[in-house]
Amino acid sequence: MGDHPGNRTPTGTLPLPAVLLCVLLAGALSMLCAEVLSGASVLWFVTAWGWIVTLPLYMVHLVFLFSLAVLFRRTSLTSLYLWGVIFGLYESWITKVTWAGYIGSEPAGGTVLGFAPAEFLIIVLFWHPVMSFLLPLLLFETLSSSGADDAPLLPGHRWLLARGRRSIALFSGFALIGAAFLTMNSAYNAVSALVTLLGSAGIVAVLYKAVLKVSRDNFSVYSLALKKKGLILAIIYLAALYILAFFVLVPEHIPPAPTILLTVLIYAAVVLLIWLDRPISGNTDDYGKGTILGVCHLAGFLLLASVLIAIFSIFPPLGGAAGTVIYLLLIVLGPVLVITVAGLVLFRFVKNRRTLKSSRVPEENQEEFPGSPGK
């Protein structure tokens, strides 16, 4: 990585303890956005499983895929969404949810070609790309900038994070989604839901303060990009996790070979789209063009989610209706997102090819007529 503008030094100069704390902070943010706001891990921090299995799973997936994005210069919003889809496909090999539905229950809409359609559309096409991957990165950028105008951000993220109606509406929407799902999956127990939310936010706050102290307030989202040794360790961990979980965790949900082959083809399609997406040359974000959200704004969204949890717990029919409507909307939003992203990638790819082709025509004509001016 190159130097960043302003008084921030290259992220590669961060001491190892600071890098490890950054990775832990990113993992805690992913847990908060994905597992806590979905209500899948109520009071996770008081269980060994939460610390030993769930947190590392989210943490390593996030930093490994983000590191690949930086390494291959595929860090645009469209590319990051596609990396998030790869993130979400772990729900096939590890939990088998996209194949057989949630553990202990049947698929919501039956199965199609060996897949649970509702679960696949929500988990793979929306929840993990957005809530497990993109949103934690946005929050990490917000924390690392502390509202500074010169903070190194990922391309296109300043537009999303700039203070104004757009960012307020975006994060308020996330607060609403999380409050509805967390309340429902906490059986409308306000104490359980609030302790889960605020406890997870407290872990994030402690890690954030530790990162600030060790890094001397000199870190950015690029601090999460692993070096060679980190990538190797992440590959070893993920390979062991996938192989072990595939054969040990609900092995009765392992699908027939055609479904597994189709899953592999989905990976291939996503990787192809990432490859077709235009690479980003270095850090191309516009610096100093709008102040982004600060920590105080994030505290406000946390307060909003807490108030909504209290309301939904007091009026369960309202919470249930909100959760059901959001669930149905996400079934539609997932396909809309992936179709939009794929369309943008293919459109830009074709446009760039035409631009390159048209730019070569004058050169070829000039070579064809050596007597032209300048020869």
Image (cartoon, rainbow, N blue to C red):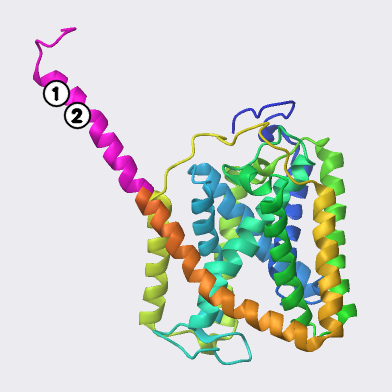
Which residue is more in the foreground, 8 or 148? 148
- Establish if 368 lies above or below 84: above
Q: Is residue 345 visible?
A: yes
Relative image position of residue 369 (x, y in whole percent): 9, 17
Relative image position of residue 135 (x, y in whole percent): 66, 57
Relative image position of residue 42 (x, y in whole percent): 79, 77
What is the CA distance from the residue labelled 2 to the residue labelled 1? 6 Å
Question: Which class describes the residues within 10 Å of circle 1: few (<14), some (14-19), or many (20+)?
Answer: few
Magenta-drawn segment = 348-375
Q: Residue at x 42, y 85 (%)?
A: 114
In the rendered structure, the answer to whether residue 171 lies left or right of residue 357 reads: right
In the rendered structure, the answer to whether residue 165 lies left or right of residue 115 reads: right
Q: Residue at x 29, y 35 (%)?
A: 356
Residue farthest to the top? 374
Amino acid at dot 2: Val
362 in magenta: yes
Question: Which class describes the residues within 10 Å of circle 2: few (<14), some (14-19), or many (20+)?
Answer: few
Which residue is more in the foreground, 304 or 103? 304
The image quadrant where one finds the C terminus is top left
Q: Residue at x 52, y 86 (%)?
A: 100
Amino acid at dot 1: Asn
Which residue is more in the foreground, 350 or 273? 350
The image quadrant where one finds the N terminus is top right
Q: On the image, numbered disc 1 is attached to which residue?
A: 365
Q: Is residue 53 visible?
A: no
Magenta segment, principal secondary structure?
Answer: helix
- Rendered image quadrant of residue 145: top right
Which residue is more in the foreground, 234 or 284? 284
Q: Are marks 2 and 1 in contact (CB under 8 Å)?
A: yes
In the rendered structure, the answer to whether residue 272 lies left or right of residue 370 reads: right
Q: On the image, numbered disc 2 is attached to which residue?
A: 361
149 in magenta: no
